Image (cartoon, grey):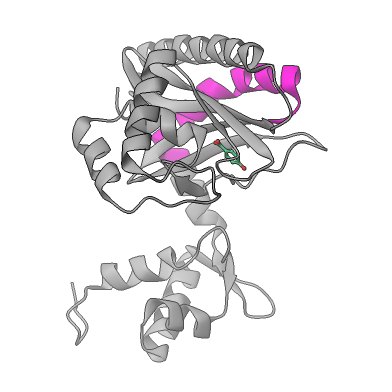
Amino acid sequence: MANSRSGDSVIDRVTRVLASFDTTRTGQTVAQIARRTGLPSSTAHRLVADLAAAGWLERDDDGTIRIGMRLWELTTRGSLALGLRQAALPHMETVQTALRQHTQLAVREDDAVLFLERLSAPGAASNIARIAGRLPLNASSSGLVLLAAADPETQERILAAPLTALTPETIAEPAELRRKLAEVRRLGYAAAPGSIELEATGIAVPVRHGNDVVAALGVVVPRSQGDHERIVRLLREAADGIRESLQVASRSTGISIPGA
Ligand code: PHB
């Protein structure tokens, strides 16, 4: 693989170009891509042109560059997340019909929560979680569920790193986070009032495949909504349903879900 003068490979440079797109930067000019990746302008122009010719990127009429539909198609089709999402969606809809707020499915990816799916309703509480978007593990209810079930090394790494506080109510102090994780394991769910946004509460439960926690199923409701018991009951029933669907899917396809 041809390396540039700085020693990085073509794959490194392509990765930097693709990774410069995120939930807040879905369309960029080539000049912005060059600036954000640190690549020389001529290199950015050449890579973007090659990626666009292959369909991995797309160019709007005004020259804005976006992730190409072909990339979405390929990653969605092939990903194990799709199996999880397909197993979860009917059960998420049951929760959503009962609560009419936001229902979301998330996994741990690197040291963050990655949201795979989200159902919402008009007039629902404010929610900053986006499909394919990330949030800190310590801040969201889904993250707390996933972190509470993570291997000890991962937990210690997160506890030792600087913890992001999104509001004054985010648990960003290691000893307090450790206590909260123990509580989540004991109760079997996480409630995070005001932790992401002061006016919203996130509540999440683990989704299991066999005995492994493979995802978190959560809702975001207005903080004034008090009946957490009913919400937890609905979430647990849905998580049990997802577990059964995953079981059936893995028996019929042989596909296993990461972590299982
Ligand atoms: C949560 O998962 O706890 C959560 C996510 C997004 C929000 C609020 C809460 O906006």
Name the residue rendered at 69%, 80% in the picture. Answer: 62
Relative vertical location of residue 12 with respect to residue 239 in this rendering, above or below? below
x, y percentage for residue 56? 47, 62
x, y percentage for residue 12? 27, 69
Name the residue rendered at 52%, 29% in the picture. Answer: 85
x, y percentage for residue 259? 29, 27
The prevailing secondary structure element of the residues shown in magenta is helix
Q: Nearer the viewer, residue 235 or 35?
A: 235
Name the residue rendered at 52%, 47% in the picture. Answer: 132
x, y percentage for residue 125? 73, 38
Horizontal arrangement in the rendering, residue 83 relative to residue 175 (left or right): right
Q: Quadrant of residue 90?
A: top right
Residue 85 within the segment the image draws in magenta = yes
Relative vertical location of residue 67 with respect to residue 179 in this rendering, above or below? below
Horizontal arrangement in the rendering, residue 3 relative to residue 192 (left or right): left
Relative vertical location of residue 255 with respect to residue 66 in this rendering, above or below? above
* Residue 97 visible to the viewer: yes
Q: Number of callouts in the render?
A: 0
Name the residue rendered at 36%, 82% in the picture. Answer: 38
Ligand 1 image position (quadrant): top right
Q: Quadrant of the C terminus?
A: top left
Residue 93 within the segment the image draws in magenta = yes
Q: Quadrant of residue 25?
A: bottom right
Where does the magenta region start and end?
Answer: 77-102
